[in-house]
Image (tube, rainbow, N blue to C red):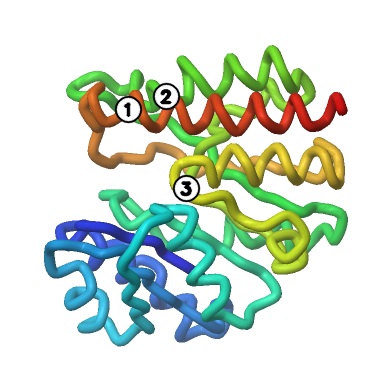
Amino acid sequence: MIIPARDEESTIGGVLEAVLPHQRSGLLDELIVVDDGSSDATAEVAAREGVTVLRRHGGGGKGAAMAAGVEASSSELLLFLDGDVENTTEHFVPRMLGPLLLDPELMLVKAFYERPFGDEPTGGGRVTELTARPALAVLYPELAQLRQPLAGETATRRLVVEKVGLEPGYRVEMGLLIDVALQWGAASIAEVDLGVRIHRNRPLVDLAPMAREILAVALERAAGAQL
């Protein structure tokens, strides 16, 4: 398992407490936190839990942090979780890995969930609903039914990452999703229900750059596929 994290000292401990039992049971053979240049005590909190902490500094954002975690790992199955989720539970791990263990034809597993927004039970995931899903519906209609294409809870096979790579920054989730569909077909992608997912909702000023990166990678892949 690889957890890319930046400035998540308030939540990383809870995420690790939820998943560490699976390392002790043997379901997880590795647990790596990639501290992506945090300015807080994210790395120190993770280290106190006894997991491997990889510190990186430099550009590339989330995608580069995920790639660094893959490079530092040796597992054939790769599970990525976000470090800012406030309600990670022990069920995340077996639910995400189960489909890959049971079906060798599956290449990618994405979580889906409800995302509260403020006091409302739904409404989170604005970039997903306003950018990612509309882009998929127009450019890749075979992926239009995916409910959370940008979910950080992602499981895949090492051979997938070795074949298609990981995009830098916020491009990583959309890039991996489309690349898997183009290489192995939409039927190689599965979704798993994780219930309700609670994490911080970013202000719009932070969401605009994310939306641009996600739309750019979708358009680039569509243009390449037509060549």
Q: Looking at the image, do the residues carrying marks 2 and 1 touch, with CB atoms under 8 Å apart?
A: yes
- Residue drawn at the location 65% of the way across and 46% of the way down: 176
Q: Is residue 40 left or right of residue 224?
A: left
Kindly give the residue lying farthest to the left in the view shown: 40
Q: Earlier in the sequence, mark 3 or mark 2?
A: 2
Give x and y (percent) for residue 63: 49, 54
The kind of residue on which mark 3 rests is Gly
x%, y% of residue 190? 71, 43
Q: Which mark is residue 48?
A: none
Q: Which residue is mark 1?
A: 207
Q: CA distance from mark 2 to mark 1?
A: 7 Å
Label number found at residue 127: 2
Tell me: residue 66, above or below residue 151.
below
Q: Residue at x 15, y 58 (%)?
A: 10
Amino acid, disc 2: Val
User: Helix, strand, or loop for circle 1?
Assistant: helix
Q: Which mark is residue 152?
A: 3
Mark 3, Cα crowd under 10 Å, few <14 / some 14-19 / many 20+, is: many
Q: Nearer the viewer, residue 69 or 47?
A: 69
CA separation, marks 1 and 3?
15 Å
Mark 1 crowd level (few <14, some 14–19, many ≥20, 10 Å Cα): some
Which of the marked residues, 2 or 1, is nearer the chain's N terminus?
A: 2
